[in-house]
Amino acid sequence: MQSLFQTYLTLGFEHIADLKGYDHILFIIALCAIYKLSEWRKVVILATAFTLGHSITLALAALDIIPINAAWIEFLIPVTILATAIYNVVVHRFSREMEEGTFDRRMNLNYFFAAGFGLIHGMGFSNFFRAMVMPGEHAQLIKQLFAFNIGVEMGQLLIIACVLTAAYIAFNLGKIKQREWNLFISGGAAANALVIALERWPG
């Protein structure tokens, strides 16, 4: 029999890796689009910034400290994906380093985006979490939140590993340039995000 911690750890992992609600997966894919396998540490730090962001709003929403407008949050999640994809293409479009296979990533700005967009995704996670939460004292709820966030982080790391491995294969076996890979991944993410955003328009 699973402990309470293991139960919510599994719930967090399964939620982020659920292909039926693939918007969070799409965001992580877009976040990885400008990186190579050798730069996995930078991507992990970005994913951790995203986790810190969504942990804050998930906790605040789960504890009913901040109000949530579910319709607007579900709309804003694909908007964050679209913004990330556009940033990948526009900001690095004229970078000389791109032609040489590397990027001037302006990491501080990337961290800011990841953490800021994580705040929005955390409010999206809260709808699922509150439906699954077991009644109890605040101490119990905090334990559930902690385990759920660890599970989400584990799921994100798995997605990152898959995307960076695919990038490695594309660069080394497929001889695809990093600029082309970025355009392909970011373009695909942007197109999907636009469709999702239009479907979720709260008006």
Image (tube, grey):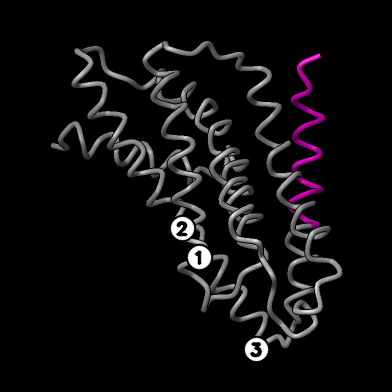
**Which mark sits nearer the N-terminus, 3 or 2?**
2
Question: Residue flagged by tag 3: what amino acid is it?
Answer: Leu
- Across and down, in percent, residue 9 comes to 29, 40
Residue that label 1 marks: 42
Q: Is 14 in front, or is 100? A: 100
Compared to 174, does 135 lie above or below? Answer: above
| Dot 2: element | helix
Residue that label 3 marks: 173
Residue 158: quadrant of the picture: bottom left
Q: Is residue 192 magenta?
A: yes
- Across and down, in percent, residue 136 comes to 20, 13
Does residue 8 appear left or right of residue 85 in this picture?
left
Viewport quadrant of the C terminus: top right
Task: Please tell me whether the stretch drawn in magenta is mainly helix, strand or loop.
Answer: helix
Q: Which residues are magenta?
A: 187-203
Dot 3 alpha-carbon crowd within 10 angstroms: few under 14, some 14 to 19, many 20 or more? few
- Across and down, in percent, residue 174 comes to 70, 85
| Dot 3: element | loop
**Residue at horizontal 42%, vertical 12%?**
65
**Residue at horizontal 35%, vertical 44%?**
151
- Across and down, in percent, residue 98 comes to 77, 77
Q: Are marks 1 and 2 in contact (CB under 8 Å)?
A: yes
Residue 68: quadrant of the picture: top right
Question: Residue flagged by tag 2: what amino acid is it?
Answer: Ile
- Which mark is drawn over residue 45? 2
Dot 2 alpha-carbon crowd within 10 angstroms: few under 14, some 14 to 19, many 20 or more? few
Does residue 64 appear left or right of residue 69 in this picture?
left
**Residue at horizontal 69%, vertical 73%?**
103
Dot 1 alpha-carbon crowd within 10 angstroms: few under 14, some 14 to 19, many 20 or more? some
